[in-house]
Amino acid sequence: MEVIASVNKLRLKFPGAESLLFKDFSLSIRKGEKVLIVGSSGSGKSTLLQVLTGLIPSSVEVPMKVENIKIPLSWGFVFQDPESQFCMPYVDEEIAFVLENLQIPHDQMPSYISYYLKQVGLSFDDMHTKTQILSGGMKQRLAIAAVLALESDVLFLDEPTAMLDPEGTEEVWNTIKEVGEDKTLVIVEHKINHVVDFVDRVIILSDNGEIVADGSKQEVFEQYKHVLIDQGIWYPDAWKDYLLANGKPRPQSTGWDSNSAITLTDFTGFRGKNKKIEIKNVDVFPGEWITVLGKNGAGKSTLLHAMMDLIKTKGVYTIFGQDAKKINKLSDYAAFVFQNPEFQFVTNSVYDEVAFTLRLEKWNLDKVSNKVEELLEFYFLKNHEHSHPYQLSMGQKRRLSVAAATVKGQPILLLDEPTFGQDAKNTFAILEQIEYLRSQGTIVIMVTHDLNIVEHFSTRVWVIDQGELTIDCSSSEYTKGMHKVVG
Amino acid sequence: MQLDFSFRETWLHKINPSFKFILIVALFIHILFIHNINIIINYMIGTAILYILFTGHPWKRLLIISIPFILIFLTSSTSMIFFGKGEVTWFKWGLIHITEEGFFRGLHLGFRGLVFATLGIIFALTTRPVYLFYSLMQQLKLKPKYAYSFMAAVRLIPIMFEELQTIRYALKVRGVQSQKGILGFYHLLKSYSIPMLSQSIRRAHRIAVAMEAKRFSDTTKRTYYYLVGFSKLDVYLLIYFVVVIGTSYYFANSYSYFPIQDVRYNN
Amino acid sequence: MGRALKLTDILVTIIIALIFGLVYKLWGPLYGFVSVFGLHAEQLIYGMWFIAATVAYLIIRKPGVALLAEVAAAHGEFIFGGEWGVTTLIFGLGQGLAAELVFAAVRYKKFDMFTVSLAAIASAGASILIDFYYGYIGDLALWNLLLLIGIRCVGAVLIAGIFAYFIVQALEKTKVTNLIRPVSSNDYKDLDK
Ligand SMILES: Nc1ncnc2c1ncn2[C@@H]1O[C@H](COP(=O)(O)OP(=O)(O)OP(=O)(O)O)[C@@H](O)[C@H]1O
Ligand SMILES: Nc1ncnc2c1ncn2[C@@H]1O[C@H](COP(=O)(O)OP(=O)(O)OP(=O)(O)O)[C@@H](O)[C@H]1O
Ligand SMILES: [Mg+2]
Ligand SMILES: [Mg+2]
């Protein structure tokens, strides 16, 4: 079949990087194929998509050389980061921008706009809504709508659902499946469960930017399973195998101080003047791992922000018996990981970022460097210690933000989706690290959409719905209920 | 943060932005050729009426906005009043030399500054940037490359204020506490301004990439989501200024405030 | 590697310009306040109105950005409701052109403090030229006029020259400049290793 996109002998190296990311890399994609590209975090997947669309080097200048390159005539791109892909301030204008580029007549625009919004399951009372106030998940759906509006033959998708709730993920993939029927799809994704059933070709990218497997999905998942395990990449049975290998029982939170460490009573958090989160009454005990579940826009991040005293709050909030509002430096008690890892960074290098808190604490130099090296090693960031945090891949940023937040070992950990965009090995590494801290008595409050974590790591579940805590139960109860619903 | 605040839409909001812009530039050029202080004063009254009655903003806000006007008046006039050249000395003390000519030249500059300021603020208060740039593209053939860059950048401004908040959150979460004194202030300023600038640049860069990924191009033709056209109101505004200018000249000749026709030194 | 302005360059220039446009707007009342002290003390801070051009040039290092930045900043000040209205645009155009000419004279190859200070002085010169017609400053007493010119130039060098240079140095540490500046030919050579 006709080749629609290809590179031949691609060489690419980021300025200042130690080695080439791609060395004589070749790949071609034929018309109508549904290709899934997997690889560990930092292997160059996002970069590859940008090369295949010509964004590198035409929009982003990166030194590269290629013997032959074929860029599809008409393509659409959904980026990994929802924040940075909007060109206009309002929802309707964002899609209209694409329509304008395609010279759709003025009077047809409104109907097109509502059509595309509906396709991704977004509805607004007024389409003229600011994109800024959408939740992370809603933003990503809007981004997909804008790309659908391009009506192109080839779609490049770079982890389009990393931040969506399970329902949204399902919906978006269904949408993509539908609209992608007669299109060529090139998908980069870590969590492949939803994708597997409609791709027909799988490519595995190794850590050093080489194709280590390329074939039909049956072929790859059966014959190359060892490669997937080796590289620490997700595959359909990854969780099962991990649990088998580790024989892991569900953690118990008993055996700790029975005094509650955190108490929230009639606790409310505000964004501007609007009440966005309300907690009637909860007590949290040392050694608990609470997963916070809820739809996109439910108020999970807002809850964590409120607990970190970043937004205006009312009500009772005590930490170890003290009024949280009177605590001068809350960061001595609680570590925080933002949903967007970039919000975390305050220094100019990966190394400094991890060392930052320790230096504030006036640790001595040797101790700092030992600790930092240890963590960077653990999170596979050692090769990037001199990079700027912003130059990392998405998954690397995420890991860095977790490393930087957990380095000091505060008794409370507030984590906003710390495992999104990770490959299998890093997900388990992060979870094990958190589990270790928890087993030492740390309280973990973690927002996630991953139900495997609920089932196998956490001890307690909070479900947030429209700004209210609606379910508060142990994980086993929650999973039991879940199975009932499913079964 | 919300930068736009509520107001009542008036006919001035519905004027074609490009037309409004050109009209103001034309008035500006015309005013530069006026050297008669009496005309300027009448002109000022004409624009002030527009500002007070037709911008659609509550009068309290209008009042607050006009506070700096006093400063404009002062900065534009004082040097000339105290140090301007002239024949008829009113007052002399050390370096200060107030002459009749210098005094009126200073007043003239002050009033003229006020007219420019009022015209500018009327424009700012009654024009939505998005419409302005759509109009500039449609009527004045501004290249989309520049217009969309401007619109994207204008959109980034409120986000920049959010950025400040994000930086504040980050510093708080990471346990940075501000120091006291001048040095502390310097650190504070630096730890906000540099990240904010660099973040804005990064954002701008990403948006540019996203725009190109959405097939934005300067070379192909494009359609517009907002069509900005002309209306009768544009004619009304034109007539308004024709009348203002006409009466300014008429009254300046028949009922002048000051017996000065030209404030320049050599005439 | 071409030196023509790409969309990225334009957007980045304009965002820098608008940030300074906001500063320009805030500078207005401050300028008015300082001028109460008399004897052109305010001229010392006049240099802030030239800074967009030099900062943008130092960051992006391409032909045209100094002019674009200064005009865009003036336009920003105008649409934010700056006290001088349209006047700002004329000054912005003149100041931007003057700075651009200096950068053209060094063929866009020098990015040191001296070059930007020269550009700052050029901008100051342009603003003074416009003031001759616009502000009748030729009608000031000679000593007073010279004082104004002198202080304005010193302020220009301090703010739009030296201060601008340090801002960009601080920005370079955040590696953001790597994003927009042309990649060096050495980095291309590395590809053949
Ligand atoms: N601007 C840059 N400067 C220097 N190095 C970079 C830059 N962008 C990316 N890199 C490096 O290139 C490598 C590949 O990055 P890329 O974003 O393509 O990874 P990825 O496979 O998409 O990872 P992830 O799954 O985490 O998103 C990473 O090691 C990253 O640190
Ligand atoms: N900075 C903000 N200003 C105003 N409203 C906001 C802001 N951030 C979020 N909101 C609103 O608050 C509500 C809760 O948002 P929040 O980000 O807490 O959702 P979430 O549960 O974390 O969703 P997601 O899974 O998408 O991250 C949403 O309605 C959102 O529109
Ligand atoms: Mg990636
Ligand atoms: Mg969230």
Image (cartoon, rainbow, N blue to C red):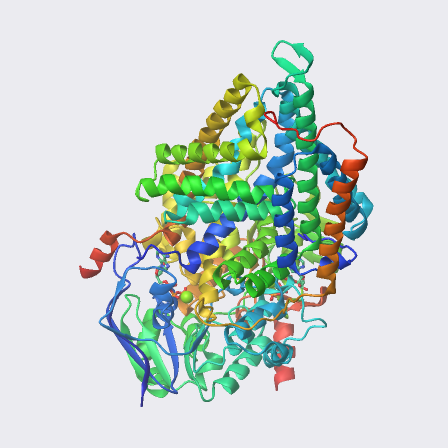
In the image, residue A98 sits, relative to residue B93, either above or below, namely: below
Q: The C terminus of chain A appears in which quarter of the rendering?
A: bottom right
* Residue A254 picture location, percent across and down: 60, 60
Front position in the image: A368 or B174: B174
Q: Write the residue at 52% across / 42% down.
A: C92
* Left or right for B242, reference B213: right
Front position in the image: B247 or A47: B247
Front position in the image: C119 or A304: C119
Rendering quarter of residue A267 = bottom right
* Residue A425 picture location, percent across and down: 40, 67
- Visible in this render: residue C69? yes
Q: Write the residue at 71% across / 37% down.
A: B40
In the image, residue A178 sits, relative to residue B188, either above or below, namely: below
Q: The N terminus of chain A appears in which quarter of the rendering?
A: bottom left
In the image, residue A397 sits, relative to residue B91, either above or below, namely: below
* Left or right for B246, reference C175: right
Q: Write the residue at 54% across / 43% down.
A: C90
Front position in the image: B99 or C60: B99
Toward the top, the furthest residue is B94
Rendering quarter of residue C162 = top left
Q: Write the residue at 40% across / 61% down.
A: A393
- Visible in this render: residue A405? no
Figure quadrant, ligand 2:
bottom right
* Residue B157 picture location, percent across and down: 58, 51
* Residue B58 picture location, percent across and down: 81, 49
